[in-house]
Amino acid sequence: PLPPATPQYRPAYHFSPARMWMNDPNGMVYSQGVYHLFFQHYPEAMVWGPMHWGHATSKDLVHWQEQPIALFPDKLGWIFSGSAVIDENNTAGFGKNALVAIFTHHNDPEEKKKTNRHQYQSLAYSLDQGQTWTKYAGNPVLPNPGIQDFRDPKVSWNTAAGKWIMTLATKDRITFYSSPDLKAWTKESEFGEKLGAHGGVWECPDLFPLTLDGKQQWVLLVSINPGGPNSGSATQYFIGQFDGKKFTPASTATRWVDYGKDNYAGVTYANTGARRIFQGWMSNWEYANQVPTSPWRNAMTVPRELALRKVGADVFLTSQPVPEIGRALTAGSVKLQNLTVKPTLDLTGKLPGLGDKFQLKMSTRQLTDFALVLANGRGEELVIGYDKKANEYYVDRSKSGLVAFSDKFPGRHAGPRRATTPAADLTLLVDASSVEVFADQGLTALSELFFPSEPFTTLTVKSAAGLSISELSYSRLATEAK
Ligand code: FRU
């Protein structure tokens, strides 16, 4: 029996499965006007278990329709994380424009006990836009050479190599493989043994190009668990060059895609042209199996557009919500100008129908300490702010309601401010039980869950130092689907 239902925590413009367990996004691909999001799914329980690939589709990256389960466990194992490509030239021979999924088979527990060879890479293909899938009879296509953690293949066509490149998490590093046909794989190189964060195992990588000042750079995403900047799961990135065989980083600094506790295993969609659209799993392995929702557990982040930006001599990866989100959040729109906060400003009455699913944007010409406080009549609050002395943005959910289900959940979690201008801007996306913070056009991102025992009904800005807000805008989802 499942715990009593918690519709109050169900997000409206984030994907969550109707029922049961979800973790990593998988096989994300844009095809014939439809975004396909597959996901790690256990349809029998609200906790992690024998993995399937669930499936959801969207035409606008805002409203999602759950589809029948795409991939079921088979005699080679459970279906772990992986990617999907459109095989335009029929390199694999499954058919022109076949959708091909490349995933990890995880054979648990029979072989695990005997060898380290229980994870290997396999294929499945669909000729009907992801409705039905056929597993390749020659699976696995990449057997395990004897590495305990050998998983999460992210495949894309590489023009320099003239081949498919697989970016694979191999314990404490990334291994690149190449293939002309998705079936025969050759090892090209390894990356990261002594670089980046190593507080946990490396998982769910991605490799893709982005342009900066007219020059192509390569971004390598690597999720690690544990060892994130605010403990538990998180995703680091490297920027450098990839020559078709080898990745060479331009900087050895450890950088994180998101400094909140709830954005893990994120990778990007295939086949979106010049747009680079990222989506992550909005949870953390420290407590993903305990969050107080029912009859489902966990949601995805909003899709985000990634870009590179220079700040002084540094180059950072920025992430901002895809514009589709802003275009869907237009109801009850309010725009306020030239507000002074000293020491507090209650916005509640100025934002009619505040609700718990909205977008808030705020800009200032002179950034100083401030705190935005969402609260309810029970003394519960969620605080989003900036600390000038530490030069960091933060989310404090210590007193945000239900927090005791895990001692790793409550707390204040911060990320460094990267922008150096006095002016700053902030976008908040609030959706029932999550907040995503994008500061300085996406130079700092923080994603966090919260579970108030009653919805938050007031919004107050606090600033002892005195904050001048040049513009503040607020809007809600026009049609609350689901
Ligand atoms: C990351 C991960 C992957 C694995 C999947 C299993 O969250 O551990 O490495 O493929 O989850 O569900």
Image: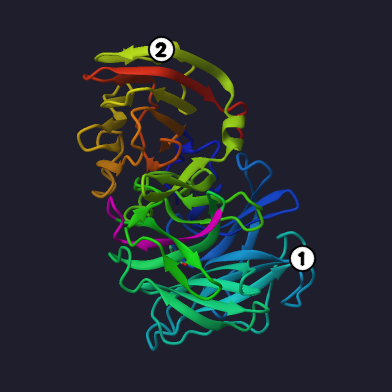
Left or right placement of residue 285 versus residue 214 in this view: left
Dominant secondary structure, magenta? strand
Mark 2: amino acid? Asn
- Measured from the top left, where is residue 50 in percent x and y? 49, 68
Q: Residue at x 57, y 40 (%)?
A: 322
Residue receiving disc 1: 97
Badge 1 or badge 2: first in the primary sequence = 1
Q: Are marks 1 and 2 in contact (CB under 8 Å)?
A: no
Rendered view: 273 above or below 249:
above
Describe residue 71's horizontal placement relative to residue 386 as left or right.
Answer: right
Residue 215's image quarter? Answer: bottom right
Q: Position of residue 241 (x, y in %)?
A: 48, 65
**Residues in magenta, as a range:** 215-231
Q: CA distance from mark 1 to mark 2?
A: 53 Å
Identify the residue shown where x is 60% and y is 39%.
62
Q: Is residue 133 above or below residue 382?
A: below
Graded by Cα atoms within 10 Å as few (under 14), some (14 to 19) or many (20 or more), the crowding at tag 2 reads: few
Q: Is mark 2 within 8 Å of ligand 1?
A: no
Quarter in which the C terminus is drawn: top right
Which of the numbered marks, if any, corresponds to residue 338?
A: 2
Q: Is residue 414 magenta?
A: no
Secondary structure at numbered mark 1: loop
Q: Is residue 411 left or right of residue 275?
A: left
